[in-house]
Image (cartoon, coloured by chain):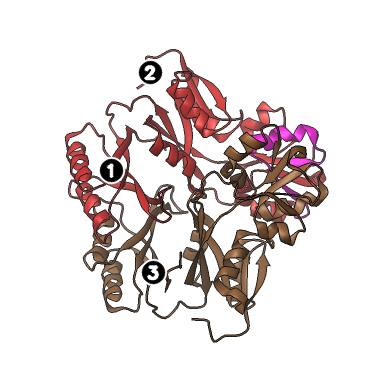
Chain colours: A red, B brown
């Protein structure tokens, strides 16, 4: 774990005010200085070049599904997953400090955030025009230059850009969580409750996937996620992302991984890490 | 199949000029009148109310992953999947008829389309500002009102909105395909080459998923997709979406489905349909 280290730098998906920054803050607390990056690839670059010690990247949202570019980079590059964070996504309606709800004519945000607050917008601001922005943080930042506008974003973005929260928790589905990975040069030593993430491919024949998954189930290793993803080479030819409970340095996991390797074209361990605290 | 029917109405995700419209046209040819809807839910409503005979909805993209709202609606509502379409996604740089590449200062599109053309934009238009739009079709539509701007969208959108294609096929990854489902009141009778889509949930214990998948593999039914999705109730509690080759009216499939039902909390057949022609 990171408790002994005093000075850390963690790169995250910016700009300042994103949920990714909130996740990084939740994971590192005051132990790390946070550095915003404009795209995911830059985060991998920063950690690989030694500019940052760790990166924090979104991987999955309960409402939107997997963050495919993050999965692709985990697959292509060689950094390890060394931690995970789960964050409840709370959207607020944000406006200039002197704004009033009745005066809002335009709502700006990332298209996904607008979609996630549809019911609130239909009921409270049925006449407001919707406008797309690159990110929720960017939307809040844009408010300074527009009249009669509100943004959908996080409370921390409102604070950072000197704006006011008009209405809190406007998302339709309160069960909106995002899972983030902490990536670094190596994974973590075993803790009390770990998870391991792997990616592999098998021949496209009946039973090949089951054969691989059996190596987990017969050792009582609980699978917590599975997803087939098309390969970049041939459309609808799949690789599999799988998470299971356990640490790869444990004997049972080592045996399972070894047996799985024999049944796959390739198998890459993305990392073992302590499970996120809910 | 639909060959004998003369007058059909198919609802798709609009506005006119989206890839979803292209998919509907590819599937129905001239046999159907196409009706744009502004959101996915409206497509389900239109088919359920009898306003439309079929709906065409995106379900999965090779670059962006699953279209989660479509999966949710397939799960919640009772329409059946009766067909699938695969469409190569080709992005063009589009501008006003008199525009020239050298004069473009602003590029508008859906954030995903902008991300998918990053290399082209970095090389050819490094100084252009990027601006988000709700859809690629909407971006093309917006061009009429902006100076020195280009949109990323489909050639058909350029035609529909009276704009010009400046550069074709600007996407970074040519292996960019989207899979669409055709939904209707019932599924299709068996053809020569079918696929069946199901969704189910199992107890969160080691081996439960393998137990279900074995019912397919021991009958030589080839799995073509699997994805765990968090339930809406409890974060990170999962349901599984699985596609396999075969038609649910075939004896082997019926046996497999019956055995799988006994091993799951619930199992819903989303439909059996002829596989898309590549």
Among the two numbered marks 2 and 1 on one chain, the one whose residue lies closer to the N terminus = 2
Q: Residues within 10 Å of mark 1 (few under 14, many from 20)?
A: few
Q: What residue would you read off at disc 1?
A: A266
Left or right of B256, for residue B8:
right
Which residue is drawn at the image coordinates 75% and 39% (left, top)?
B104
Residue B67's spot in the image, x, y percent? 52, 55
Give the Cα distance between marks 1 and 3: 27 Å
Disc on res. B195: 3
Residue B234's spot in the image, x, y percent? 43, 50
Q: Nearer the viewer, mark 1 or mark 3?
A: 1
Q: Chain of mark 2?
A: A
Secondary structure found at label 2: loop
Q: Nearer the viewer, mark 2 or mark 3?
A: 3
Q: Chain of mark 1?
A: A
Query: Are marks 1 and 3 in one subunit?
Result: no
Disc on res. A3: 2
């Amino acid at each position: 774990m990171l408790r002994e280290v005093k000075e850390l730098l963690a790169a995250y998906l910016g700009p300042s005010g994103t949920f990714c920054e909130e996740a990084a803050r939740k994971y590192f607390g005051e132990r790390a200085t946070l550095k915003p990056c404009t795209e995911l690839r830059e985060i991998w670059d920063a950690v690989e070049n030694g500019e940052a010690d760790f990166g924090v990247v979104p991987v999955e949202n309960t409402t939107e599904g997997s963050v495919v570019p993050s999965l692709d980079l985990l697959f292509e590059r060689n950094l390890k997953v060394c931690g995970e964070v789960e964050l409840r996504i709370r959207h607020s309606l944000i406006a200039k400090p002197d704004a009033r709800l009745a005066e809002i004519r335009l709502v700006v945000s990332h298209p996904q955030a607008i979609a996630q607050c549809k019911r609130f917008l239909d009921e409270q601001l049925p006449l407001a025009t919707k406008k797309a922005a690159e990110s929720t943080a960017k939307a809040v930042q844009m408010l300074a230059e527009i009249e009669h506008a509100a943004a959908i974003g996080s409370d921390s973005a409102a604070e950072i850009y000197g704006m006011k929260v008009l209405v809190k928790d406007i998302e339709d589905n309160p069960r909106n969580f995002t899972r983030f990975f902490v990536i670094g040069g190596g994974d973590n030593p075993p803790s009390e409750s770990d998870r391991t993430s792997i990616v592999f491919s098998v021949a496209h024949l009946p039973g090949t996937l089951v054969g691989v998954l059996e190596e987990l189930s017969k050792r009582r290793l609980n699978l917590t996620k599975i997803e087939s993803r098309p390969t970049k080479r041939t459309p609808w030819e799949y690789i599999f992302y799988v998470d299971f409970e356990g640490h790869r340095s444990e004997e049972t996991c080592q045996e399972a991984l070894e047996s799985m390797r024999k049944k796959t074209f390739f198998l890459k361990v993305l990392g073992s890490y302590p499970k996120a605290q809910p």
